[in-house]
Image (cartoon, rainbow, N blue to C red):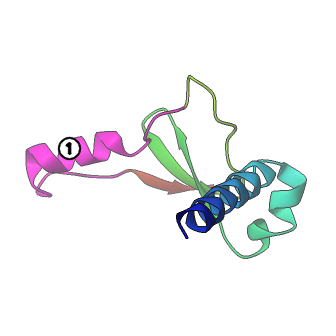
């Protein structure tokens, strides 16, 4: 039983990763998820709603992009926390 569960878990994670990698391709994204949803994109300290595909993961952008917002919320208890949201 544990062996089956392990194989199902590996298959599930592999499928998730494959879909994520495919959605980084602009053509695939625009013809699938891009038809029904927008994507959030962070540039400097601003967050934009765009039709861009998911970003390729690199060492430079491999961080939790909304961590700074949680830091503001922790320190300000939502009173002064402002998130900059722009649309392109």
Q: Quadrant of residue 10?
A: bottom right
Task: Residue at 83%, 48% (x, y): give it.
Answer: 25
Q: Quadrant of the C terminus?
A: bottom right
The residue that disc 1 covers is 72
Task: Residue at 22%, 41% (x, y): give it.
Answer: 71
Q: Nearer the viewer, residue 6 or 86?
A: 6
Q: Is residue 21 left or right of residue 74?
A: right
Q: In this view, does 69 lie to the left or right of 3?
A: left
Task: Tell me where the magenta segment starts and ends, as one range.
Answer: 62-83
Toward the bottom, the furthest residue is 36
- Is residue 76 one of those drawn in magenta? yes
Q: Is mark 1 on a helix, strand or loop?
A: helix
* Numbered label tally: 1
Q: In which quarter of the image is residue 16?
A: bottom right
Crowding near the residue tagged with mark 1, few <14, some 14–19, many ≥20 C-alpha atoms within 10 Å: some
Q: Where is residue 54 in the image (x, y as percent from the top left)?
A: 68, 49
Is 12 above or below relative to 80?
below
Q: In which quarter of the image is the N terminus?
A: bottom right
Toward the top, the furthest residue is 60
Task: Residue at 9%, 55% (x, y): give it.
Answer: 77
Is 58 above or below relative to 26?
above
Q: Position of residue 31 (x, y in %)?
A: 87, 67
- Is residue 64 one of those drawn in magenta? yes
Q: Position of residue 42 (x, y in %)?
A: 52, 42
């Amino acid at each position: 039983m544990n062996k089956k569960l392990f194989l199902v878990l590996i298959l599930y994670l592999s499928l998730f990763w494959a879909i994520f990698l495919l959605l980084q391709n602009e053509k695939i994204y625009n013809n699938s998820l891009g038809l029904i949803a927008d994507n959030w994109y962070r540039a400097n300290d601003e967050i934009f709603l765009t039709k861009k595909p998911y970003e390729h993961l690199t060492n430079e952008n491999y961080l939790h992009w909304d961590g700074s917002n949680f830091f503001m919320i922790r320190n300000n208890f939502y009173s002064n926390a402002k998130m900059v949201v722009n649309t392109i």
